Amino acid sequence: MVVEFGGVDMARLLAPALEQRFHVSVAVTKAPAPWARKRDWQVNAEDVLSEVMATRVRAKTALALGLTADDLFVPGMSFVFGLASREGASAVVSVNRLKDKDDSVHLARLTKEAVHELGHLHDLPHCEDPLCVMHFSNTLADTDAKGATFCARCSRKIAPP
């Protein structure tokens, strides 16, 4: 399930890529922006993630991905593109810093970060391969440089038995 918070309207574009990579059907739901602690203009990613988890539990789905327009942070970092909780079977990605004048670049970035966070839900750690979608992104240049797919090593880890 993909939960679009606030005015985000990207799931319809993102869903086909997620369905292809994870071989699942993606349901989309909309929800108001959740309450979250703030730091200047940013919101705490952990608070938004908690709402994604609660939405997943209410909907009785196995996994959930939240999309928000809010700029996210976690304590100790100036920002994050996204955050995942394997135990909560949920992840959140902000579209805020991924924007570009070119809509196809924006969607490519969002796809990479969504697949990355969902990869964490499949127990994948960050990958050393700079082209793997599981490679850590600290900047937009990092996101733009990596691929949108898993490397061979990461693919083997999430392949069905």
Image (cartoon, grey):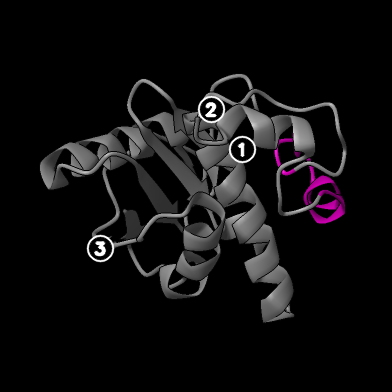
Task: Tell me where residue 87 sits by quadrant.
Answer: top left
What is the secondary structure assignment of the residue under circle 3?
Answer: strand
How crowded pointer 3 is (Cα within 10 Å; few <14, some 14-19, many 20+) is rated as some
Circle 3: residue type: Thr
- Residue at position x 86%, y 33% in the image: 129
Residue range of the region highlighted in magenta in the rendering = 133-146
Say which of marks 3 and 1 sits in front: 3
Q: Which numbered disc flags the more N-terminal residue, 2 or 3?
A: 3
Q: Picture coordinates of residue 98 (x, y %)?
A: 66, 59
Q: Earlier in the sequence, mark 3 or mark 1?
A: 3
The picture places residue 88, in percent across and down from the top left corner, at 32, 26
Q: CA distance from mark 2 to mark 3?
A: 25 Å
Report if the CB atoms under discs 2 and 1 are less than 8 Å apart.
yes
Q: Which mark is residue 74?
A: 2
Residue 80 - label: 1
Residue 29: which numbered mark, if any? 3
Q: In front here: 6 or 152?
A: 152
